[in-house]
Image (cartoon, rainbow, N blue to C red):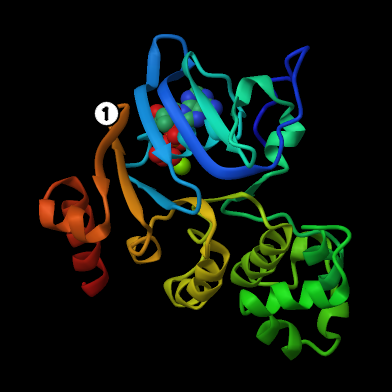
Amino acid sequence: MDEPVIVDDAPDAETLPDITGEADFEDVTFAYEEGTNVLEHMNLHVKAGESIALVGPTGAGKSTVINLLCRFYNLNGGRILLHDKAGMTHDINKVTLHSLRSQLGIMLQDSFIFSGTLMDNIRYGRLDATDSEVKEAARRVQADELIRRLPMGYQTEIKERGNNLSQGEKQLIAFARTLLSDPAILILDEATSSIDTQTEKRLQEGIREMLKGRTSIIVAHRLSTIKNCDRILYISNKGIAEAGSHEELMARRGLYYQLYTAQVREEAA
Ligand SMILES: Nc1ncnc2c1ncn2[C@@H]1O[C@H](COP(=O)(O)OP(=O)(O)O)[C@@H](O)[C@H]1O
Ligand SMILES: [Mg+2]
């Protein structure tokens, strides 16, 4: 993460127990710079297992919502609560950053690939995973096809920063790694934005596999990637301007409808 560390554990921070994925944003207000609120009085209830997509114009605050959930920044107002498996709720400000972030699977536009074998790179998601668990994760996101094509398979040595892999291949390896880590909440922020449309289509199966039964929050420029999410939130004007399923928002003929139809027109052109 390149984000500056400007938050720290509270002196009496507790370990966040295993969470269910259920989350509440309560009256959340946030500004990076004093006087310029990016989000104002935002409320959101995320159900366990629900997939949520954030869409809207650049600079609207989609990544900010994610940054706040990961507690890369502290709120200016309101709170964010996570529900644990014993039915208790925890304010993210009051738990250790490690116990919070280790339960979140965060994938951004560029994934970190290090020198070492492909096996090691995927196993980084869960260090005690067996070889067969690593392979199973790769198979589920459909990365095994790519890996088997390589002469050394899982033992292929990855060069510095993954220079012998394409952007799409790197993300596929990162999908396998994330799936292996089995996060309570999966977060994808433009994880497929640096990939061409064809490759993104191929990655969609892997994304679907990661989402299965898992709470997830996804930002994707191409709306075909998020169309099937349980709920789509259109972020603008410092909060949630529209919310609903793809079908509901299309029927409403509002902001999401405009965004979607503009993108379909663009792709056809
Ligand atoms: N680290 C930062 N410092 C100051 N302003 C920021 C920072 N990150 C984002 N912003 C501003 O906050 C607003 C929301 O940004 P962001 O959440 O990244 O939007 P989105 O992901 O929807 O494109 C924008 O106006 C952006 O310029
Ligand atoms: Mg963003």
Q: Note whether residue 6 is visible.
A: no
Q: Position of residue 99 (x, y in %)?
A: 74, 35
Quarter of the image for residue 39 reads: top left
Q: What residue would you read off at disc 1?
A: 237
Q: Position of residue 125 (x, y in %)?
A: 77, 58
Q: Secondary structure at mark 1?
A: loop
Q: Position of residue 199 (x, y in %)?
A: 50, 75
Q: Position of residue 17 (x, y in %)?
A: 71, 36
Residue 172 as seen in the image, left or right of residue 62: right
At 68% across and 59% down in the image, what residue appears?
178
The answer to which of 53 and 154 lies nearer the viewer is 53
Residue 204 as seen in the image, left or right of residue 267: right
At 36% across and 26% down in the image, what residue appears?
42
The answer to which of 57 and 81 lies nearer the viewer is 81
Quarter of the image for residue 153 reads: bottom right
Image height check: is 120 above or below 198? above
Q: Quadrant of the C terminus?
A: bottom left
